[in-house]
Structure formats: C-alpha cells, structure tokens
Amino acid sequence: MSALEVTFVAADRTVWSGQAAQVVVPAVDGSMGILPQMQPTLAILGTGVVRIIDQDGHVEAVDVEGGFVSVDSDIVTIGVDDAVVVAPTSSRL
C-alpha cells in the first residue's frame, strides 16, 4: 500500500511528521482530500481542521487558521503560523 510522507510544521515547532494513508485539509475553496499518487498541488489553507489519518486508521486532528499545503510525489508539506492539536481519535475513513 502506498503511503504519504507528511511533514506538518508551525512557526515554532513540528506538529506532526510521518507516514499517512490520507490527509484532509481546509483549503480556502473547500475541504481537500489528499491520497497517494495525487497530482502535484499547491493550495492555500483557510480556517478549519487538518486531519491526518495514519496507516492504522488513527486520526490526528489539528485546528489551523491559514497556511499552505504542498503535494508532490507522495510528499505532503503543511505549513501554518499556529496549530492547536485536538484530542486524537480512531477512525476508519
């Protein structure tokens, strides 16, 4: 199974780093799901929750206000000014 290599950083720290099965971000023009083998993409983030679903189905949810996401060759980079981690959950999305 393909995986995404995710690096999620805020201005003062690394929020999350590792492999994920799926990432969902709040782009300014709507929610955007990211899966392996996706076309290269660059998007501006709005206000909302970034959800990172790992290979086991665990979800890391992080509140953000603005930033960007870059996707290229299964490498996902998320950069924001500030991020607030929401309690982790388990999900089979």
Image (cartoon, rainbow, N blue to C red):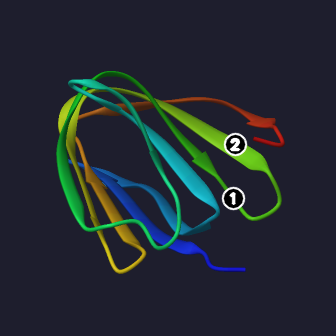
In this rendered view, identify the residue nearer to me: 77 or 17.
Answer: 77
Who's the residue at 46% across and 73% down the image? 37
Percent of width and height locating residue 18: 55, 71
Which amino acid is tagged 2? Val
**Vertical position of residue 53 compared to residue 77: above or below:** above
Percent of width and height locating residue 49: 46, 26
Which amino acid is tagged 1? Asp
Q: Quadrant of residue 71?
A: bottom left
Percent of width and height locating residue 85: 52, 32
Q: Considering the numbered disc 1 on the image, is that residue within a helix, a strand or a loop?
A: loop
Q: Is residue 76 left or right of residue 49?
A: left
Q: CA distance from mark 2 to mark 1?
A: 7 Å
Percent of width and height locating residue 34: 46, 53
In this rendered view, identify the residue nearer to me: 59 or 10.
Answer: 59
Quarter of the image with the N terminus is bottom right
Query: According to the image, label 1 marks what residue?
Result: 54
Quarter of the image with the C terminus is top right
Who's the residue at 59% across and 55% down the image? 22
Query: According to the image, label 2 marks what residue?
Result: 59
Q: Is residue 53 left or right of residue 80?
A: right
Q: Is residue 77 left or right of residue 24?
A: left
Pointers 2 and 1 in contact (CB under 8 A)? yes
